[in-house]
Amino acid sequence: MTDSKRALVLHVSRGGEPLVFALSEDGARNVAAKLPDLLTDGAVYDPELANGSTVVVNFAHVVTAHLDELPPLAKVYGSELPRKHGFAN
């Protein structure tokens, strides 16, 4: 069985495409526990992304949010960086 990659999907109040962030395992666990309160309170939160960085989300501008599974080769904000890329080869 392959490791599942969790993503936070945000639909913001200005419309357009949803914002998708790849989460670390801890980040996904923490967001799952807090997501209803974050949306209700319009709070600011900084989940840990899969690449070790964080992103600050102001949930006052989020209409709806959910956790989802990423397809195996998906590249979104916070995805783990490949070992070799660009001029680093």
Image (cartoon, grey):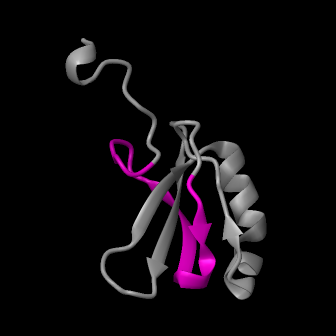
Q: Which quadrant holds residue 58?
A: bottom right
Q: Which residues are magenta?
A: 55-77
Side (left or right) of 21 relative to 88 = right
Residue found at x 56% / y 54%: 55
Residue 71, magenta (yes or no):
yes
Q: Is residue 66 above or below residue 45?
A: below
Q: Is residue 17 above or below residue 29?
A: below
Q: Which is nearer the eye, 26 or 57? A: 57
Q: Is residue 6 above or below residue 12?
A: above
Toward the left, the furthest residue is: 87
Side (left or right) of 5 relative to 75 = right
Q: How many marks?
A: 0
Q: Indicate the position of residue 17 as horizontal and vertical percent values.
A: 31, 75
Residue found at x 51% / y 36%: 2
Residue found at x 54% / y 41%: 50
Side (left or right) of 87 relative to 39 = left
On-image quarter of the C terminus: top left
Q: Indicate the position of residue 8 as horizontal and vertical percent values.
A: 54, 62
Residue found at x 61% / y 77%: 59
Q: Indicate the position of residue 21 as horizontal and vertical percent values.
A: 48, 56
Q: Which is nearer the eye, 18 or 70? A: 18
Q: Indicate the position of residue 12 as horizontal and vertical percent values.
A: 45, 81
Q: Which quadrant holds residue 20?
A: bottom left
